[in-house]
């Protein structure tokens, strides 16, 4: 489903879903690839991963993870049941968002809170794991939003940066929300 994203009538949208898809699949000839690793560093000290790494205390210690963001908190079949008590003995700070990987789900409600958590982790010289069930859609979307909000990186470059580190593929609804965020930030002179 191709769509131009913009709330402001008459002005040119800053991106489209198809454009983002093209960026995500540019080096694969249009194919969507799933990650080959349980986790990958996508920005200095920011890792995106799947459920298995979030539960692997030994590997978390080995990497030096100090903060964890669960972008799939909950009890459903595509959710990950973790919480602060799971990491208490490791001294890891935790935040979780009850989000489902569905095009109709409003993940943008968490963009600024997630960006603040990531920024604070990095300010404390921490290492952060952002995960969901597969480390492809929800977690990737929140990291891209962080780059846009806190690092003032426009959507195309933020997607390229994260994709360079990991095979990702946010669902169309999340891409649309990122495009709207880009439009809002651009309108407010955030990138200028």
Image: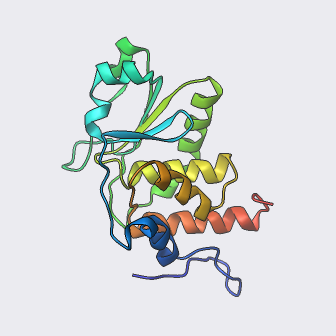
Instruction: Give me the residue at 40% from left, 61% from top.
Output: 170
Residue reaching furthest to the top: 89
Q: Which colour style is shown? A: rainbow
Q: Nearer the viewer, residue 23 or 48?
A: 23
Image coords of residue 68 (percent x, y): 43, 31
Image coords of residue 35 (percent x, y): 32, 51
Which quarter of the image is occupied by the N terminus?
bottom left
Relative horizontal placement of residue 145, taking residue 77 as reference (left or right): right
Q: Quadrant of residue 155?
A: bottom right
Report whether residue 81 is seen.
no
Whether 141 is drawn above or below 102: the answer is: above
Vertical relation: 59 (above or below) 16:
above
Q: Residue furthest left?
A: 77
Q: Quadrant of residue 119?
A: top right
Q: Is residue 186 left or right of residue 89?
A: right
Which residue shows up at 76% across the image and 57% down it? 190
**135 to the left or right of 142:** left
Please identify the residue farthest to the bottom as the structure is shown.
10
Q: Position of residue 180 (x, y in %)?
A: 58, 68
| Residue nearer the viewer, 61 or 111 | 61
Residue at x 59%, y 74% (from the top left corner): 15
Q: Is residue 100 above or below residue 188?
A: above
Q: Is residue 134 left or right of residue 188?
A: left
Q: How many circles with numbers are drawn on the protein?
A: 0
x and y percent of residue 124 in the render?
62, 23
In which quadrant of the rendered image does the C terminus lie?
bottom right
Is residue 85 shown above or below 145? above
Q: Can residue 166 be seen here? A: yes
């Amino acid at each position: 489903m191709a769509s131009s994203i913009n709330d402001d009538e008459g002005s040119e949208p800053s991106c489209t879903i198809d454009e983002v898809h093209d960026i995500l699949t540019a080096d694969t000839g249009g194919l969507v690839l799933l990650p080959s690793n349980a986790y990958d560093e996508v920005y200095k000290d920011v890792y995106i991963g799947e459920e298995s790494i979030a539960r692997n205390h030994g590997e978390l210690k080995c990497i030096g993870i100090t903060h964890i963001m669960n972008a799939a908190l909950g009890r459903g079949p595509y959710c990950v049941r973790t919480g602060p008590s799971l990491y208490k003995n490791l001294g890891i700070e935790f935040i979780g968002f009850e989000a489902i990987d569905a095009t109709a789900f409003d993940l943008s409600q968490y963009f600024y809170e997630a960006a603040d958590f990531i920024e604070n982790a990095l300010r404390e010289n921490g290492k952060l794991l952002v995960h969901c069930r597969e480390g492809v859609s929800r977690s990737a979307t929140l990291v891209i939003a962080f780059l846009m909000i806190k690092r003032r990186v426009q959507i195309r470059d933020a997607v390229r940066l994260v994709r360079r580190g990991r095979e990702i593929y946010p669902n169309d609804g999340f891409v649309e929300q990122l495009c709207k965020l880009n439009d809002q930030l651009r309108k407010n002179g955030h990138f200028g």
